[in-house]
Image (cartoon, helix red, strand yellow):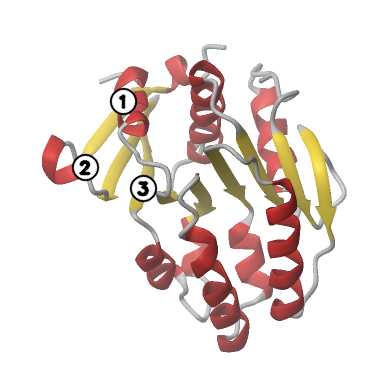
């Protein structure tokens, strides 16, 4: 299998999908982000990145250290907290420990910057958000506030998160987050191969594909 197989999987997703991408690989998050950035450029799909607490600049720095310098001039970014920037920041919101205040502020900002046409929404740093909201009230408020957002039919969302962080939280919110999603991918790595396991996806029964292996050299070839 190759990068084209992963592109075919993405092509088969309908707008309105919500994908949880659980990273268990050393370079998994950076690799999947690089794949998405290449995909949206080649398919000419508008994109909005939710950058929570500097997660996006961190992953971009990792890519730069590997010699990958993606063109981010057309990548619109909604920045929630943090100080570092990457891409075209179109609006900023402050981070607030009160989950109601944070989510209300986020919803207003998201509505103001979301493209009018169909678009891909890459969400980075939601695991960091859950670290600060690791109590029943905070997690419950955040998940309830996410429900109307994930039903946006013009948006295909990819929530890239670190599994180790999520599984160490006392409230264990990952199963509830997976329930909100239409698809769940798990990233693992064996040598130079990135393995994208399809844990949950509407197309899985039709295509009979449960995993896609991609050579990281192909992913990081730019």
Q: How far apart, in angstroms, are the residues tagged by discs 3 and 1? A: 17 Å
User: Which residue in the structure is indicated by mark 1?
Assistant: 8
Residue 32 in view, yes or no: yes
> Please, which residue is most extreme toward the right here?
83
- Examine the image and state in which quarter residue 88 appears: top right
Q: Few, some or many C-alpha atoms within 10 Å of disc 2 (few <14, some 14-19, many ≥20)?
A: some
At mark 3, the secondary structure is strand
Q: Residue at x 52, y 53 (%)?
A: 161
Q: Residue at x 58, y 61 (%)?
A: 127
Q: How far apart, in angstroms, are the residues tagged by discs 1 and 2? A: 11 Å
Position of 93 with respect to 209 (left or right) is: right
Q: Are marks 3 and 1 in contact (CB under 8 Å)?
A: no
Q: Few, some or many C-alpha atoms within 10 Å of disc 3 (few <14, some 14-19, many ≥20)?
A: many
Q: Are marks 1 and 2 in contact (CB under 8 Å)?
A: no
**Which mark sits nearer the N-terminus, 3 or 2?**
3
> Quick one: 196 or 10, which is closer to the camera?
10
């Amino acid at each position: 299998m190759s990068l084209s197989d992963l592109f075919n999987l993405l092509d088969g997703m309908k707008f309105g999908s919500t994908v949880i991408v659980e990273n268990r690989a050393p370079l998994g998050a950076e690799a999947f982000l690089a794949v998405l950035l290449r995909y949206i450029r080649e398919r000419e799909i508008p994109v909005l990145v939710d950058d929570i607490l500097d997660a996006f600049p961190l992953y971009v720095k990792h890519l730069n250290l590997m010699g990958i310098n993606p063109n981010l001039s057309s990548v619109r970014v909604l920045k929630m907290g943090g100080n570092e920037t990457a891409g075209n920041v179109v609006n900023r919101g402050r981070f607030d420990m009160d989950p109601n205040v944070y989510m209300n502020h986020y919803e207003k900002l998201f509505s103001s910057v979301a493209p009018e046409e169909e678009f891909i929404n890459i969400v980075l740093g939601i695991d960091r958000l859950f670290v600060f909201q690791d109590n029943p009230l905070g997690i419950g408020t955040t998940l309830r506030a996410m429900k109307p957002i994930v039903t946006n039919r013009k948006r295909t969302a990819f929530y890239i998160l670190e599994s180790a962080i999520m599984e160490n939280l006392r409230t264990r919110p990952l199963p509830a987050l997976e329930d909100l999603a239409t698809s769940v991918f798990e990233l693992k790595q064996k040598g130079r191969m990135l393995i994208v396991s399809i844990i949950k996806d509407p197309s899985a029964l039709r295509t009979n594909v449960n995993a896609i292996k991609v050579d990281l050299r192909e992913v990081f070839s730019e």
